[in-house]
Amino acid sequence: MGMTAAGIGSNLLAELHRLPSSDASQLSSLLGQINEALDQSPAPAHEWRALQGVLGMDLLTRLLGISQSSVRRYISGSRSTPDMIAAQLHFLAFVVGDLGGAYNDIGVRRWFDRPRERLDGNTPAHVLDDGWSPEGDGPRIVRELARALTLSPAT
């Protein structure tokens, strides 16, 4: 599913197609703007199925603090995803994307239930509990831990 089909950054993508390939500084700036647009644009219609496929229904509902029946309604489109749940889902999509660079689906699922020193011995799943916000300190550290896996050089 492309960005334009999801309604994200269509003006930026059009500008990218018009940009001369020799203009490295403008290209870098434009790519930064596109990355920011993706970061700030939850697309629950596309993220639900992808995350359910990797995390499974039990872990996904536990991380979001919602029922399986609600998830089924959101996936089917019979109910629209509330903004806060969409923000949490989007956050999880980034975390799972980062983890996918280091683990297979089983490893990704297990990662959420392993205690982490940077989380004061808590698990990421514990930190992402009780109506968490992606902007909170605990979730920020969870994201940093996942992102660190993709930034580590291969050995």
Image (tube, rainbow, N blue to C red):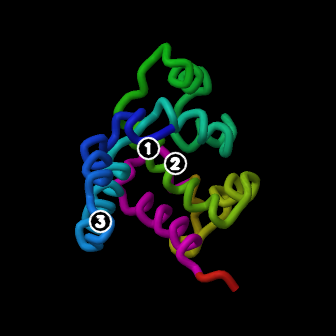
Secondary structure beneath disc 3? helix
Residue 83 image position (x, y, % from top left): 34, 33
The answer for how far apart the CA atoms under marks 2 and 3 are is: 26 Å
- Mark sitting on residue 88: 1
Residue 32 image position (x, y, % from top left): 30, 63
Instruction: Give me the residue at 32% from left, 51% from top.
Output: 17
The answer for how far apart the CA atoms under marks 3 and 1 are is: 30 Å
Q: Residue furthest top?
A: 78
Side (left or right) of 5 relative to 100: left
10 Å crowding of disc 1: few (<14), some (14-19), many (20+): many
Identify the magenta region.
126-152
Circles 3 and 1, Cβ within 8 Å, touching? The answer is no
Main structural element of the magenta stretch: helix, strand or loop?
helix
Badge 2 amino acid: Ala
Residue 95 image position (x, y, % from top left): 53, 56
10 Å crowding of disc 3: few (<14), some (14-19), many (20+): some
Residue 75 image position (x, y, % from top left): 55, 24
Q: Which residue is mark 2?
A: 93
Instruction: Give me the residue at 58% from left, 54% from top.
Output: 96
Badge 1 amino acid: Gln
Give whichever of discs 2 and 1 has the lower sequence position. 1
Q: Is residue 121 above or below residue 14?
A: below
Question: Which numbered mark, 2 or 3, is in the foreground of this view?
Answer: 3
Q: Quadrant of residue 16?
A: bottom left
Instruction: Give me the residue at 37% from left, 49% from top.
Output: 38
Question: Which numbered mark, 3 or 1, is in the foreground of this view?
Answer: 3
Badge 3 amino acid: Leu
Side (left or right) of 52 relative to 32: right
Q: Quadrant of the C terminus?
A: bottom right
- Mark sitting on residue 27: 3
Which of 139/33 is in front? Answer: 33
